[in-house]
Amino acid sequence: MVRLIDPKPKMSIYDPTVGSGGMLIQCSQYVSEQGGDGTDLAFHGQDSDGGAVSIAKMNLILHNLQSAHIEFGDVLEDPHNEKDGDLLQFDRVIANPPFAQNWTLARCGRPERFQWGHAPQTGKKADLMFLQHMLASLKGTGRGAVVMPHGVLFRGRKEREIRMKLLGARVIEAIIGLPPKLFYGTGIPAVIIILNKSIPDAERDHVFIINADREFAEGKKQNSLRPEDIEKIVHVFQHRVEEDKYSRRVPLKVIEQEHDWNLNLRRYVDNTPPPEPEDVACHLHGGVPRAEVEATQARARLKKFSLSPACVLSELDQTRHAFLPALKSTAEVRASVESQPEIAATRTRMSEALAQWWETAQHDFSELAPQPRPSTVQEGGGFVTLTDNRLPKVRHALMTQLVESLEPLGVLDHYQARGVFVNWWDSIRYDLKTITSIGWSSTLIPPPMIVDRFFAKERDAIATTEQAIAEAESAVAEAVEAAQAVLEYEPDEDETVNAALMRSELAAEIGDDESGPASKPFRDALAALKTAEATLKAHKDELRDQEEDLELKVEFKLFGTEDKLEEKTKLLTDAETDLATLGGPPPETARKAKGEPKPGKAEKEALGRRKALVKDIATLKATLARYHNLVHEIGGIITEEQARELILEKHHSEISKCLTRYVQAEERGLFALFENLFTKYAISADALESARQQTLAELQGFLSTLGYA
């Protein structure tokens, strides 16, 4: 919604149902991301929930938006956006008001706000009253966005009259249908209505309608719009792109004359999927209908991967194909398609295109860190050189270049290619802010990358130890089984046989017979079990030390040793000072002379304290020596150039993963095409009848053999 109303610096922004202030904060962040000052905005809001008002004020302060004016009260009954007796108007108004609310005209102040009519005061239909308040709060050049339930588009009587007047006043710029279950507390689908008091002349006699209710990520409890879905909505709206079954520029005459002011989205943009085709002849007699294999959607799927249906189908006659005889299940069909060389070739083409684009992007990212020279953006050579204050322009340039690299390959469409970029950019945007602020900070490097680059030997040693632990655990398990066999031990129903239990049972069997021949099998089994356990413990201790050393090496490589050394040195100094204060190290223990008095309680405590300090000092000295040795082993702290290389490698890995996810989604669509055909047509009615007759004949033969027929 924020991107749809496109706020600019120095604008005033108003949310009449502000809630926790999230939309106002997003407006600020959007302006900042576009290169403007996100704090240079005048924020206003109101809410009928006092707790929400308090949270909104705190939330805005925490985001450094100190000048926001958030008021408490019902916006329909008592609007607070007033000054000197006049209703304040704003450059941008954005809201997600509560659905299905009642309202009472007699209790509403400033009834002149509702110049387009009054919705029914019963039946929870206050939606269009919130919309009219927003319109009254818009400047003549302002734009607003409001979330409304679908009912406002088609309900009759008074609400029809309001729609008719709003459309006649040319203040509804666009209507965008959203998927169901997007919002907490309601599962019904909603729409975004874009309000504009200064619609361009070329668009004044039209309403732009987008029906995006089928494009979303499905969740268990709540659905969500994917980045590519948002990109598509925004791009189609901003450029007025008309797409079949998605968007349409509808003349007001059509709305009036053909639909009587009914704005039900599917009257204008019907995105109902076509019914699943079923070929009765193929169901009865076998085969896969050629018409379904060569349908537009199927051909488009195959074309993405330069694949022929012949990979799993053979031609049966002029109207039918048949699955290859070797394919007996959908899993085999999927495996056969996936193994085609065209699939691997397509993956390679996509990876190569990304690698070529990354050469450009990598150059731009290399210039991200703060520069001593003035910030500039130089265009040319197929790339934009990035400096610290030009992220929005570079984002647009790199996204355009990526789309131009991927879209011609035919696997991903324009919006999917944009989705790859947006998913990636969103995942690294905080990295970018850090880089542009303080440079190539080592805090941006994941520890596993440090391990792979600098400590592969230590990583491999840990893997070897882990393998040794697995083998030792197997040896312990075998020793436990051997002991159980020697003991002929039968556990109780809920009893677990483990090493501790077997040791106890073996010791009980051995008893005092520590050398006799009768106890020898038990002594041998106990010795083998203890040896296996000791080996396992030794390997686990070794692994713990290796992991601690590696963790310290990674920390020292990333951040240096100053903090750790300073901390331990201070502790050592404090311990030595305390020990000196108490009289130094305690004397060595010696036998007391006869008749010498025993030390008192205080003397014992002081002696114990001195002993503890001596032990602590020895431990701290050993730790400091260990730290110095580790510093020598790691070869010093990571350099800025090394950090830059690893951060760029991390970013490249992230966008490669994004691209892989999108390509895999297209592959799944291709597999599903053939799997669906196999499920429908692999077994015909004739084949089923033939199998039934064969089974009946076999049954008849059995009955005849047994003399029953």
Image (cartoon, rainbow, N blue to C red):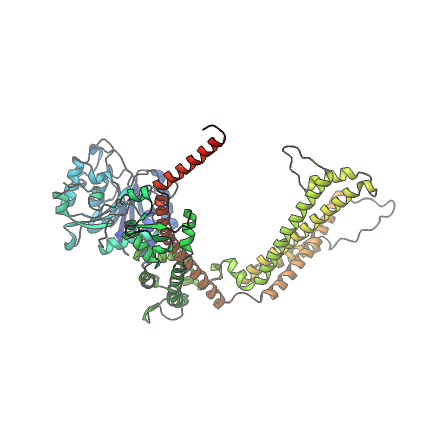
On screen, residue 498 above or below 345: above
Task: Tell me which residue sits at (23%, 38%) in the image.
Answer: 151
Quarter of the image that includes the C terminus? top left
Residue 82 appears in which quarter of the rendering? top left
Foreground residue among 319 and 120: 319
Q: Is residue 707 found left or right of 24 in the rendered image? A: right
Task: Tell me which residue sits at (14%, 47%) in the image.
Answer: 252
Residue 412 appears in which quarter of the rendering? bottom left
Q: Position of residue 459 (x, y in %)?
A: 58, 59
Residue 280 appears in which quarter of the rendering? top left
Q: Position of residue 227 (x, y in %)?
A: 34, 52
Q: What residue occupies the far top of the structure in this picture?
A: 708
In this rendering, does residue 583 appear at all?
A: yes
Foreground residue among 522 and 74: 522
In this rendering, does residue 32 appear at all?
A: no
Q: Is residue 489 found left or right of 595 in the rendered image? A: left
Foreground residue among 357 and 676: 676
Task: Tell me which residue sits at (15%, 51%) in the image.
Answer: 204
Foreground residue among 342 and 201: 342
Total numbered circles: 0
Q: Position of residue 254 (x, y in %)?
A: 14, 46
Q: Position of residue 105 (x, y in %)?
A: 20, 34
On screen, residue 339 above or below 360: above
